[in-house]
Image (spheres, rainbow, N blue to C red):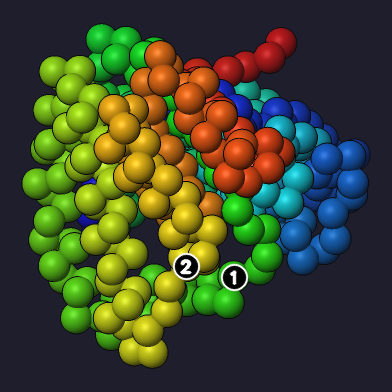
């Protein structure tokens, strides 16, 4: 329904190896050195089938994946995980896909994975199929190298309302939903203008406003719900207080209670200290702009 803009980060990533062979009688999926059950492997097999069809092969595969994401952080790893698997399949099956085609393939496994093919700022085009929906990098003249993102891992409990159910309920019942959709195009234009002019304030303000509008849609859903926790509000209030004291920083959140704080590197130490005092230091993880997909020979 709408384009989105992201920043690829270095702190959370996945390393994946895939081998196809006539000697394998079924697909095997190892995640963090643990052989996964049939239900989990079935999801991976569905993606492997897409890659196999492109390569015109029926060979089964062994997938070995390592997620470098904090344990029980409540952070989705599907973006990096499926991007890595797409890249590994591209190499192992000699598909020779360019980055845009690889983005399209990754999207078939996880929508957000299409963005993780690229480094820096990335835009995901809305659409309905492989041809219309894919991601591409946004020229930034190294603006992202001045930025940091601080993750506040506030809650690792299972959400009462899943992301999928939350989206369905919001789209079908929230009177605020269309207003958010109608405002996205303007927000995206402002974000890209901010990147082009290296205007951190405009970037942060637009990001934070868009986040608040999105979360506002859930309050008007029927029945209403929210992903915010008391600690989420505590973190947001701290961001406002930091800004009032002259430290430019802005927050964003996805469908969960964890808060992400965008800051310039020069103010990173202050942000880390502030939130380590509010929460535990283990809950505060700093990340910087990261590379796109890489092949490790």
Q: Nearer the viewer, residue 24 or 110?
A: 110
According to the picture, the residue beneath numbered tag 1 turns out to be 159
Q: Tell me if 123 is positioned left or right of 74 in this view.
A: left
Number of on-image labels: 2
According to the picture, the residue beneath numbered tag 2 turns out to be 227
The image shows residue 252 at horizontal and vertical percentages of: 38, 47
Residue at 16%, 70% in the rendered image: 178
Residue at 58%, 18% in the rendered image: 294
Q: Quadrant of residue 146?
A: top left
The image shows residue 20 at horizontal and vertical percentages of: 77, 35
Residue at 53%, 76% in the rendered image: 161
For the question of whether residue 107 can be seen, the reply is: no
Q: Nearer the viewer, residue 160 or 55?
A: 160
Q: Is residue 86 above or below residue 163?
A: above
Q: Residue furthest front?
A: 245
Q: Tell me if 226 is positioned left or right of 183 in this view.
A: right
The image shows residue 123 at horizontal and vertical percentages of: 29, 36
Q: Residue furthest bottom?
A: 223
């Amino acid at each position: 329904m709408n384009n989105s803009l992201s920043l690829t980060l270095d702190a959370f990533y996945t390393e994946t190896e895939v081998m196809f062979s006539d000697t394998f009688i079924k697909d095997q999926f190892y995640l963090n050195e643990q052989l996964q059950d049939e239900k989990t492997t079935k999801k991976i097999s569905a993606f492997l089938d897409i890659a196999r069809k492109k390569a015109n092969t029926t060979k089964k595969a062994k997938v070995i994946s390592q997620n470098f994401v904090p344990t029980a952080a409540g952070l989705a790893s599907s973006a990096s995980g499926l991007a890595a698997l797409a890249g590994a399949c591209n190499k192992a099956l000699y598909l020779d896909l360019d980055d845009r085609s690889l983005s399209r393939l990754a999207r078939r496994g996880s929508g957000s994975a299409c963005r993780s093919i690229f480094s820096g700022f990335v835009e995901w085009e809305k659409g309905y199929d492989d041809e219309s929906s894919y991601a591409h990098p946004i020229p930034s003249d190294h603006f992202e190298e001045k930025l940091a993102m601080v993750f506040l891992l506030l809650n690792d409990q299972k959400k009462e309302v899943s992301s999928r159910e939350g989206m369905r309920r919001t789209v079908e019942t929230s009177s605020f939903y269309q207003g958010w959709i109608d405002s996205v195009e303007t927000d995206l234009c402002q974000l890209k203008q901010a990147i082009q002019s290296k205007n951190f304030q405009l970037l942060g303000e637009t990001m934070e406003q868009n986040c608040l509008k999105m979360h506002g849609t859930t309050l008007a859903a029927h029945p209403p719900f929210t992903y915010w926790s008391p600690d989420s509000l505590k973190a947001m209030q701290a961001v406002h207080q930091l800004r009032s004291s002259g430290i430019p920083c802005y927050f964003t959140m996805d469908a969960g209670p964890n808060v992400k704080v965008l800051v310039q590197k020069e103010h990173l130490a202050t942000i880390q200290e502030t939130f380590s005092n509010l929460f535990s230091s283990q809950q505060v993880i700093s990340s910087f702009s990261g590379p796109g997909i890489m092949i490790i020979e």
